[in-house]
């Protein structure tokens, strides 16, 4: 019975997220973060449940995440691989959740097999252990956001 409710929560999260994205885009909004926030409330372990559905490439660091992600996107496209990506820059947990769910059918089957995910340094430490990426690219780390992360080595150690 417990397994049934876990699957039910995942299915519900997928459907509600897709409906929320559709509704937000219908009214001219981006629909990148809010749907993922809702999905994470409905199914808190959604990253664990989605980890085996995609080959995951994660890009993190203080600077250069978007540029690096765009370079990798170009490589994937040139290789003829279909993939999903959070190109809009929604690089926190909610944006990553929206990106992954958007690449699923209503039944939870992946539409594409590869996910290129740009992630904020702080979000990386909570998302990566659950998603178990095959490839991790770290651009760099600087002390530019001590108010968010504290000591630089704390952030560095959380990525290791």
Image: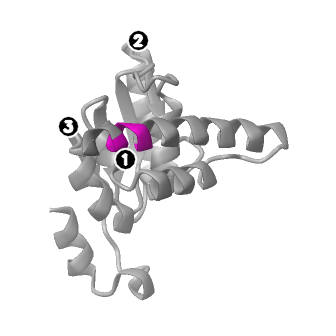
Nearest the camera: 17 or 73?
17
Label ID, residue 119: none
Does 8 lie within the magenta span?
A: yes
Which residue lies at the image location 40% right of the left edge and 22% below the top edge? 110
Label ID, residue 134: 3
Q: Which residue is mark 2?
A: 80
Q: Classify mark 2: helix, strand or loop.
A: loop
Task: Determine if residue 91 is in view.
Answer: no
State which mark lies toward you, 3 or 1.
1
Nearest the camera: 136 or 5?
5
Which one is earlier in the sequence, the residue at label 2 or at label 1? 1
Q: Say which quadrant the N terminus sits in.
A: top left
Which residue lies at the image location 33% right of the left edge and 52% below the top edge? 45
Q: Quadrant of residue 33?
A: bottom right
Q: Position of residue 42 (x, y in %)?
A: 48, 53
What's the magenta region? 5-9
Q: How has the structure been colored for display?
A: one colour
Q: Which residue is mark 1?
A: 46
């Amino acid at each position: 019975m417990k397994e049934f409710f876990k699957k039910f929560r995942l299915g519900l999260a997928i459907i509600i997220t897709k409906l929320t994205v559709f509704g937000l885009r219908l009214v001219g909004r981006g629909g990148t973060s809010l749907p993922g926030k809702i999905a994470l409330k409905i199914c808190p372990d959604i990253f664990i449940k989605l980890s085996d559905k995609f080959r995951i490439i994660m890009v993190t660091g203080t600077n250069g995440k978007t540029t690096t992600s765009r370079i990798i996107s170009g490589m994937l496209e040139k290789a003829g691989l279909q993939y999903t990506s959070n190109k809009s820059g929604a690089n926190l947990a909610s944006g990553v959740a929206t990106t992954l769910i958007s690449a699923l059918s209503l039944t939870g089957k992946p539409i594409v097999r590869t996910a290129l995910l740009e992630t904020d340094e702080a979000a990386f430490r909570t998302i990566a252990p659950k998603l178990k990426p095959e490839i991790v690219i770290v651009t760099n780390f600087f002390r530019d956001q001590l108010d968010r992360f504290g000591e630089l080595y704390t952030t560095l150690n959380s990525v290791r």
